[in-house]
Image: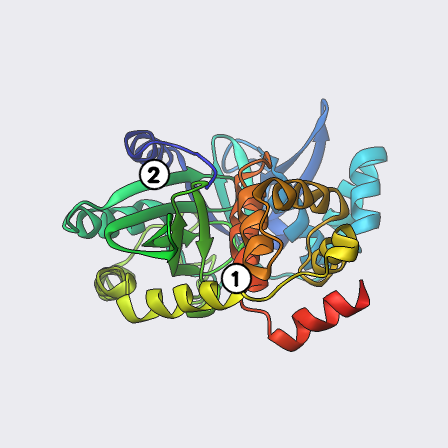
Amino acid sequence: MKSGLTLEQLAAELTRQNTAKADYMVSTPSIKMEFCGDSLFLRMVDGEEIDRVEPFEVGEIAHRQIGTYLGIHAKYYNKMLEQAPGLLAYNANHWFTKEPEERMVRTLDGVARAFLSNRYRRIDNYEIASAVLPIIGEMPDARFESCQITESRMYIKVVNPRLVTEVSPGDIVQAGLAITNSETGQGAFSVQPLIYRLVCSNGMTVNDAAIRRNHVGRVASAEENFLIYRDETIAADDRAFLMKVQDTVRSAVDEVRFHQVVGMMRDAKDARMNTADIPNVVKLAAKSFSITENESGGVLQHLVEGNDLTLYGLSNAVTRYSQDVVSYDRASELEAIGYNVLSMGRSQWNRLNQAA
């Protein structure tokens, strides 16, 4: 499992961000994109074109969301962003005015980090952490294995060493859970079972058993407020939701589900690989599970080093390779892909081997 922040570092950064961030509900005719220096900025203006707040530099995620909202193809949007930012600003401002709509602009540290629907429901990292960390603290011997906050998500990965077994002699696995949330519209809040393999410190998220909550709520109006504050109705709704989150975390480390996945691991050890062309088996599997060609080379290396030419070995090679990638987001995706590989049907596994 890829290393990240310590629990203390996570808490400090969540506290800092909770103070530094601000959200604005704005009608699009009041939004102006402007190129200044080397960057594009979003201005939020009144009827006299006077800035209501300091302009915000546009972040990468917000750029993607603005392009999608305006219906500008990503390839062309990125070309304008790189080669003709003034033209991009002109196009954006035209469509902001032409088709008025209320949007939520989420900001942090002087950057517009998200451009979202007025139905977007804020389920924020600070609130999630405040709800779940005390519950995890009540779990005997629970260990925070890896935590991180990226531009797109927060991750909290916890291992419960009391729920432990062997896949085979010496190959010990422990149960755990992975909590993820996005403040920028990059995915739902979720709690997923986690399998932690001690041999290589591999983590595997069991993504077909996730409990999710989408960020969709009531329609908010720019006429209600410019800088968003929580009203009592939203706060009461959030309290009910966070209580459900706590109950979910308490029951997330499920012994029955843990042993089901361990059973899949044991079965996968009997699914032998076509050793006549191992690189091609890996290549075909990578293509089936959205692993890039460059990444498949790393997976192949770990497969060979692990000397386990089975479906189980391939799954472990994927999760082991996740520790090598730079992006924590991508590492977490590979932990989920490792489970997808493990849980592929035996007929699909046989087809991959026959095709190689």
Q: Which of marks 2 and 1 is nearer the N terminus?
A: 2
Give the amino acid at mark 1.
Lys
Looking at the picture, does residue 54 appear above or below residue 116?
above
In the rendered structure, the answer to whether residue 334 lies left or right of residue 221 reads right
In the rendered structure, the answer to whether residue 121 lies left or right of residue 42 reads left
Q: Residues within 10 Å of mark 1 (few under 14, many from 20)?
A: some
Q: Which residue is drawn at 21% across and 50% down?
A: 136
- Element under label 2? helix
Looking at the picture, does residue 13 appear above or below residue 335?
above
Residue under label 2: 18
Q: Can residue 27 be seen in this view?
A: no
Q: Residue at x 67, y 40 (%)?
A: 301
Q: Tell me the CA gap for discs 2 and 1.
A: 46 Å
- Element under label 1? loop
Residue under label 1: 269
Q: Nearer the viewer, residue 336 or 269?
A: 269
Q: Where is residue 183 in the image (x, y as percent from the top left)?
A: 45, 50
Give the amino acid at mark 2.
Asn
CB atoms of marks 2 and 1 within 8 Å: no
Q: Residue at x 84, y 41 (%)?
A: 79
Quadrant of res 255: bottom left
Q: Where is residue 173 in the image (x, y as percent from the top left)?
A: 36, 52
Q: Nearer the viewer, residue 319 or 223?
A: 319
Q: Nearer the viewer, residue 151 or 236?
A: 151
Q: Where is residue 5 in the image (x, y as percent from the top left)?
A: 38, 32
Residue mark closest to the camera, 2 vs 1? 1
Q: Where is residue 48 in the image (x, y as percent from the top left)?
A: 60, 41
In the rendered structure, the answer to whether residue 145 lies left or right of residue 310 reads left
Q: Is residue 335 visible?
A: yes
Q: Which of 114 and 29 is in front in this view?
A: 114
Label placed on residue 226: none
